[in-house]
Image (spheres, coloured by chain):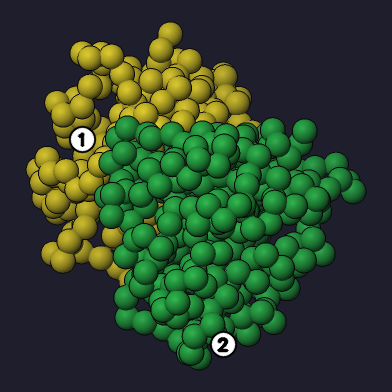
Chain colours: A yellow, B green
Amino acid sequence: MEVLSTNHAHGGTQGVYSHQSATTGTDMTFSVFVPDHAPGAKLPVLWFLSGLTCTHANVTEKGEFRAACAAHGIIFVAPDTSPRGDDVADDGDYDFGKGAGFYVDATQAPWAKHFRMRSYIEQELPALIGAEFPADLARQGITGHSMGGHGALTIGLRNPGTFRSVSAFAPIVSPLNCPWGERALTGYLGADQAAWREYDACALIEDGARLPALLVDQGEADNFLHEQLKTGLLVMACRKAGIPATIRMQPGYDHSYYFISSFLAEHVAWHAARLNG
Amino acid sequence: MEVLSTNHAHGGTQGVYSHQSATTGTDMTFSVFVPDHAPGAKLPVLWFLSGLTCTHANVTEKGEFRAACAAHGIIFVAPDTSPRGDDVADDGDYDFGKGAGFYVDATQAPWAKHFRMRSYIEQELPALIGAEFPADLARQGITGHSMGGHGALTIGLRNPGTFRSVSAFAPIVSPLNCPWGERALTGYLGADQAAWREYDACALIEDGARLPALLVDQGEADNFLHEQLKTGLLVMACRKAGIPATIRMQPGYDHSYYFISSFLAEHVAWHAARLNG
């Protein structure tokens, strides 16, 4: 692991790091905030998965999470959204290819070679975080925004033993039922939609996956709400499955980091209550 | 005034605006955060003057001030650091010309034509803010970072009837005594250092200007501390003048927005105590 930068912030250390990923076959960059803590202490970890076009940097610079993480003693990890590099396949559009990994393990050429963000987030990066930082991997929570909200929901639903707490900001709740999802999952996984279900929060719930609780914030003024995000499908899936979900429609808020930063401290506190308990 | 963008944030509105400035003879861009407030209410204003190379955008995106401004009912205004435009004189270096207005009214060619940031911040922009936003101009505070800390200190010291509260982050405390200041003030004001004194916080205090209180945060790991910022000169000037200054050396913090964002909410609360009293 290479240290790209560290800055003292809110009494802790905000770092940016890179490493050679065996999973993606590329260098991967991520950021970690470690609050001030007692020597030898192990802290819970909150993962933040970012949305289309983003890297680790967006939430790191604009997320307004550090004060809350410092107050609650939470490590905050922000990975990239896809493999990067000159030899990584790409697409001209913003919603497929680089910056748009959709947290899947691709099975279709040419994507299968590097686009393995599911395994990267579920396995390789947590192991690195556990080895390099004072992280208690028995206490992990996960959240994310938009495509990253989809990532947080699906990774959380598939791994209830790993993630004690799951929340999301303006998530894509059903790639099976929106243009972003149809485009990306056709490309990464092929046309057989049966293979998509483990990458669709609503389908996972329909197929039996459960969460002990769920917190979602969704802006009512979000331009992507009706065509892409379709929060109502998640409300219905949770209701039908008996998942105690708090899904808040937030009047006036859009899809930007001004929305995320308005509520991320609340999400940190919500995760902390479940991770520090 | 033209609205470039507005985003709902922390219950209020974060906007970015531009207008044709009669003072600088250019279009000028600035940002304003207006918290949620009662209809007809007028709110105090906190000005944030940014440092070298910055625009309104740096603190607007990375400052982490909105939660505190919402909690205390404070309007937050972030101007640009210089005039901009193809016909505005510039210099190849980052510390002079565009992005480096130093909050002076330049007297030397070719700078005198557009570089009038003192009059812009002291007169034209407050009048616009008063006309276009629910701002109580009888209750204004001012802060800033680095070159903008210099701006906040000198504008505050020269205008005690306008600014009830003054604070700064890692300010240039004496342009007379550092390379950044010597370069910029020679260029904008000429070689006669007598003309510089109204643009030097320590000289203003030596010449009789006073503040009822002062809050300064300075990172001990700031690379510019010893050569450019020279906080000790301000400590001595305040002590000699009997200005009750709280000047905090913050261990581990550098010159970046990770430092500013760690303490800006505290500064907002400090100003609010003086503006809402």
- Mark 1, Cα crowd under 10 Å, few <14 / some 14-19 / many 20+, is many
Q: Is residue A55 visible in the rendered structure shown here?
A: no
Q: Compared to A143, does B208 lie above or below?
A: below
Please report the residue visible at 56 percent of the width from the left and 64 percent of the height from the top: B198
- Mark 2, Cα crowd under 10 Å, few <14 / some 14-19 / many 20+, is some
Name the residue carrying label 2. B113
- Indicate the amino acid at tag 2: Lys
Residue A217 horizontal/vertical position (percent):
58, 36
- Indicate the amino acid at tag 1: Leu
Residue A244 horizontal/vertical position (percent):
57, 19
Q: Is residue B202 visible in the rendered structure shown here?
A: yes
Q: Give the mark toward the camera: 1 or 2.
A: 2
Residue B218 horizontal/vertical position (percent):
40, 41
Q: Compared to B10, does B181 lie above or below?
A: below
Q: Quadrant of residue B249?
A: top left
Please report the residue visible at 30 percent of the width from the left and 35 percent of the height from the top: B252
- The answer to which of B173 and A103 lies nearer the viewer is B173
Name the side, left or right, on which B72 lies relative to A92. right
Residue B202 horizontal/vertical position (percent):
48, 53
- The answer to which of A190 and A105 lies nearer the viewer is A105
- Secondary structure at badge 1 equals helix
**The N terminus of chain A: image quadrant:** top left
Name the residue carrying label 1. A125
- Secondary structure at badge 2 equals helix
